[in-house]
Image (cartoon, rainbow, N blue to C red):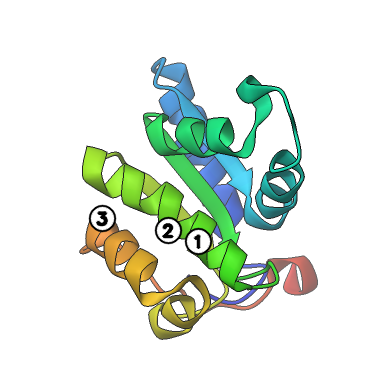
């Protein structure tokens, strides 16, 4: 967690690539794109591409990386989808990594206490809040 341009996404991509080199399946998603995709999927007739199928895939993949939690427009519907994905992963005890420009309290307000409690429990002791300058600006 931390401000923009400090390398959060870069670090998560390094982790994803390292896991993939070890043949560990990873899904890396930019959350605003994910929410848009899930929203469209609720209208798809093909069961393999439906909202439920996408939620199952995200809930069951061995490692899920959620990049930029909080960039999407938060609605009740979005909170429910977070809950469905995170709860499934919590029950199955599957690794879930995330990045955000927001702190833990702000994330809880956005995704809901239910999802935040589970997400924070899964990442407890491995959370980092980084304070640094935007490397895109400072070089």
Secondary structure under tag 3 reads: helix
Residue 73 location in percent, x, y?
Answer: 70, 72
The residue nearer to you, when weighing 14 against 121, is 121
Per the rendering, the mark at residue 80 is 1
Q: Look at mark 2 in the image and give the residue it sits on.
A: 83
Looking at the rendering, which quadrant does residue 25 occupy? top left
Above or below, comparing residue 49 to residue 102 in the picture: above
Decide if residue 6 is on the left or right side of residue 64.
Answer: right
Per the rendering, the mark at residue 106 is none
Categorize mark 1 by other alpha carbons within 10 Å: few (<14), some (14-19), many (20+). Answer: some
Residue 111 location in percent, x, y?
Answer: 49, 70
Residue at 43% from the left image edge and 74% from the top image edge: 112
Secondary structure under tag 1 reads: helix
Look at the image and tell me whether residue 12 can be seen: yes
Q: Look at mark 3 in the image and give the residue it sits on.
A: 122
Q: Quadrant of the C terminus?
A: bottom right
Q: Nearer the viewer, mark 1 or mark 3?
A: 1
Residues at badges 1 and 2 in contact (C-beta under 8 Å)?
Answer: yes
């Amino acid at each position: 967690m931390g401000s923009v341009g400090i390398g959060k996404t870069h670090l998560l991509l390094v982790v994803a690539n390292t896991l993939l080199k070890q043949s560990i399946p990873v899904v890396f998603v930019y959350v605003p794109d994910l929410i848009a995709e899930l929203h469209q999927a609720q209208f798809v007739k093909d069961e393999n591409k439906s909202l439920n199928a996408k939620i199952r895939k995200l809930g069951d993949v061995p490692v899920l990386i959620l990049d930029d939690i909080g960039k999407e427009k938060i609605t009740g519907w979005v909170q429910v989808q977070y809950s469905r994905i995170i709860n499934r992963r919590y029950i199955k005890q599957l690794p879930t990594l995330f990045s955000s420009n927001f702190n833990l309290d702000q994330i809880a307000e956005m995704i809901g206490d239910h999802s935040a409690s589970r997400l924070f429990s899964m990442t407890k002791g491995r959370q980092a809040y980084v304070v640094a300058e935007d490397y895109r600006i400072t070089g």
